Amino acid sequence: RNDATRIGDDDRVRLEVPEDALLAAEAAASAIGVSLFFYLYAVVVVGLSRLTGSADVQTAFQSHGRAGFAASEGVIGSFSNALVLAMSVDERASIANLARRLRAEARSAVSAEAYPYHHLIRELGIHPKFGVNWFPNLPGPSAPGLEISPGDVSDSQSDYDLNFRFVRTREHLELVVF
C-alpha cells in the first residue's frame, strides 16, 4: 500500500514506488533484457488498454532530441521532442513481449526525432492522449560556492489528457500522474 501525495492545487498525484515493487520490476526488466523504463512503459500501456477498453493504445514519450542534429553534444539547451508510439496490446502475450516491442518501436521512432512533434500530429492526423516519460537521476550542475537544487519535473505543462512520469531520485522512484 502506498499513499498518494497531491502536488499543489491541481490534479497531480505523486506515488513513491515501494522498494520491494521497484526491486521486482528491476529484476523482471533485467531478466527480459529491457531497461526499467520500457518494462514500466509496458505495464502502463497494458493498464491504459484495459482502462480504455481498446487494444490499440497511442502514447507519446520525450526523446533527448539530439540524434537528428550533427554536433549537438556541445550545444547548451533543450532539444527535447515528443515521439509517438502506437501499440497493439494482446492480452494473451507476455509483458516481456510487449516491453521488447515497445523498446524496438521507440528506437525506430528516435530515428525520426528531427521532425517536430506538432508537424507530425498535424500531417498524420494523430494525437496521443497519454504521455509516458522517464526522468533519470542526473547530477545537477555545480559551481564553487553555489548550491543548485534539482528542478521539479512534475510541475511542467502537458499536451496529453493523462501523464505518467517516472522520476528517479537518489533515494527512490516516484510516479507522478496528472
Image (spheres, rainbow, N blue to C red):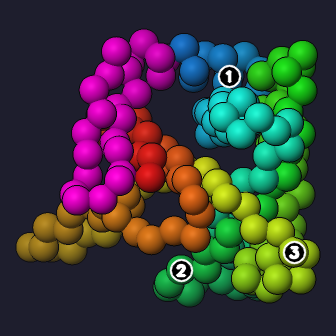
- Where residue 78 is drawn, which disc sits there? 2
Quadrant in the picture for residue 50: top right
Real-space Cα separation, disc 3 to disc 1, in angstroms: 36 Å
User: Callout 2 environment at 10 Å: few (<14), some (14 to 19), or many (20+)?
Assistant: few
Kindly identify the amino acid type of the residue bearing the numbered disc 3.
Answer: Gly
Q: Is residue 67 part of the magenta span, yes or no?
A: no
- Where residue 49 is drawn, which disc sits there? none
The residue located at (66%, 34%) in the rendering is 51
Residue with the mark numbered 3: 125
In which quadrant will I find the N terminus?
top left
Say whether residue 30 is left or right of residue 102.
left
Q: Nearer the viewer, residue 71 or 138?
A: 138
Kindly identify the amino acid type of the residue bearing the numbered disc 1.
Answer: Ser
Q: Nearer the viewer, mark 2 or mark 3?
A: 3
The residue located at (26%, 52%) in the rendering is 7
Residue with the mark numbered 1: 30
Task: Please provide the residue range marked out in magenta.
Answer: 1-23
Q: Nearer the viewer, residue 32 or 45?
A: 45
Of labels 2 and 3, earlier in sequence is 2
